């Protein structure tokens, strides 16, 4: 099944021609639960990892927060199966009555937690993107590669998981590692991605409003400009037309490759390579939700046509079951000069 972003309600470059040179193409990934193999692009799926290459581990530090009990990946999966079973039962009875005694006992055991792990921690597959599925994905520099693999350590470093990026050539992987090590535990259930297949789709993006010139920001805030352009715009936005631009016209929500940086937690800050000073570029957005309040107009037509199946997890549209910093996104930026320069992790 493909996923189709509905047409934007306004051609924003017709109203503000100054935006036209700033257009970028982003690839929305549209992760949905499935059974990916190492030969698929995926979120939380098995990687095409060479059998003769050591699996990445994180040496820490992993500082016990004294509050949260980590869970084993197997227990997180078991708990999700129980939650899915409970959600499928009639809703006319209190939620606690929808658990079987066995499920209640299992949940109690799981919630007691797993001991805080010691020593290096095996990293978890988070995303695997084949160049054939995301053609605009280009490794930094002139380095030839057609596969990007992203793993993370499922413990806070210090406020979100630590990521590691690997670029490789698919043709160079002859023997695949089919049973990689798993971490003994994850700090939070939301740090274990649910296996998802992807339906990549290219969309058009424009910069976040705060990355535009002051003059253009003022124009975007002038309702009469929107009106004189004859655009069929929703008068709901008349008191603050920049919000129309932010919600519906500039940056797609959810998982995506490339495009523009999404801001929200902070004002824009420079993203400069620590090795060479070059401006780093958005590579991959690891999102908590695919859309939310204000951005639900980005929900694909196929999902809007089937609303009962659209909103798993909490918060809603959280198909990957990832939860970062209570609902935010982790955006990875890379230096265009070299794949060896450190990447930048940005929570927004
Ligand atoms: Zn770690
Ligand atoms: Zn650099």
Image (cartoon, rainbow, N blue to C red):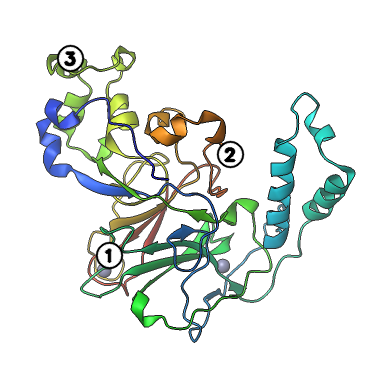
Look at discs 1 and 2 and give the one toward the viewer: 2
Q: Quadrant of the C terminus?
A: top left
Q: Is residue 118 visible?
A: yes
Left or right: residue 266 versus residue 22 is right
Where is residue 153? Give x, y as percent. 55, 65
Q: Is residue 72 visible?
A: no
Q: Secondary structure at mark 1?
A: loop
Q: Quadrant of ligand 1?
A: bottom right
Depth order, front residue of 86/182:
86
At horizontal 47% and vertical 81% (from top left) the residue drawn is: 50
Left or right: residue 341 versus residue 96 is left
Report crowding for label 1: few under 14, some 14 to 19, many 20 or more residues within 10 A (C-alpha). Answer: many
Q: Are marks 1 and 3 in contact (CB under 8 Å)?
A: no
Q: Is residue 38 above or below residue 28?
A: below
Left or right: residue 163 versus residue 102 is left
Q: Is residue 247 above or below residue 31?
A: above
Q: Residue furthest right?
A: 101
Q: Which of marks 2 and 3 precedes in the sequence?
A: 3
Depth order, front residue of 97/234:
97
Left or right: residue 316 versus residue 226 is right
Q: Secondary structure at mark 3?
A: helix
Question: What distance separates the C-alpha of mark 1 from that of mark 2?
Answer: 35 Å
Report crowding for label 3: few under 14, some 14 to 19, many 20 or more residues within 10 A (C-alpha). Answer: some
Image quarter of residue 174: bottom left
**Circle 3 is placed at which residue position?**
227
Q: Is residue 275 above or below residue 113?
A: below
**Circle 1 is placed at which residue position?**
335
Q: Are marks 3 and 2 in contact (CB under 8 Å)?
A: no
**Circle 2 is placed at which residue position?**
312
At horizontal 24% and vertical 65% (from top left) the residue drawn is: 336
Q: Which of marks 3 and 1 precedes in the sequence?
A: 3
Q: Is mark 1 within 8 Å of ligand 2?
A: yes
């Amino acid at each position: 099944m493909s996923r189709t972003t509905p047409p934007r309600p306004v051609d924003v470059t017709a109203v503000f021609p100054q935006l036209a040179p700033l257009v970028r193409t982003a690839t929305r990934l549209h992760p949905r639960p499935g059974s990916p193999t190492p030969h698929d692009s995926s979120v939380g799926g098995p990687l095409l990892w060479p059998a003769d290459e050591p699996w990445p581990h994180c040496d820490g530090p992993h500082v016990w927060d004294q509050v949260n009990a980590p869970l084993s990946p197997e227990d997180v999966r078991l708990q999700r199966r129980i939650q899915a079973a409970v959600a499928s039962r009639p809703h006319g009875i209190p939620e606690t009555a929808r658990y079987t005694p066995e499920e209640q006992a299992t949940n109690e055991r799981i919630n007691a937690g797993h001991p805080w792990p010691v020593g290096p921690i095996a990293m978890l597959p988070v995303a695997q993107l084949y160049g054939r599925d995301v053609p605009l994905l280009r490794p930094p520099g002139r380095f030839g590669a057609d596969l990007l693999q992203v793993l993370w350590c499922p413990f806070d470093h210090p406020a979100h998981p630590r990521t590691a990026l690997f670029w490789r050539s698919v043709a160079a992987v002859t023997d695949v590692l089919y049973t990689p090590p798993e971490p003994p535990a994850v700090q939070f259930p939301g740090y274990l991605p649910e296996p998802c297949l992807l339906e990549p789709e290219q969309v058009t993006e424009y910069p976040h409003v705060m990355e535009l010139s002051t003059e253009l920001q003022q124009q975007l805030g002038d309702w009469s400009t929107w009106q004189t352009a004859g655009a069929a715009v929703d008068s709901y936005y008349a008191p603050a037309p920049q919000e129309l631009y932010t919600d519906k016209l500039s940056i797609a929500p959810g998982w995506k490759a490339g495009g523009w940086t999404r801001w929200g937690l902070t004002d824009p800050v420079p993203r400069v390579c620590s090795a060479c000073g070059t401006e780093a570029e958005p590579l991959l957005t690891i999102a908590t939700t695919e859309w939310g309040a204000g951005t639900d107009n980005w929900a694909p037509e196929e999902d809007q046509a089937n609303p009962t199946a659209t909103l798993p997890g909490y918060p809603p549209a959280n198909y990957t079951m990832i939860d970062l910093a209570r609902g935010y996104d982790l955006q990875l930026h890379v230096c265009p000069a070299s794949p060896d320069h450190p990447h930048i992790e940005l929570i927004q």
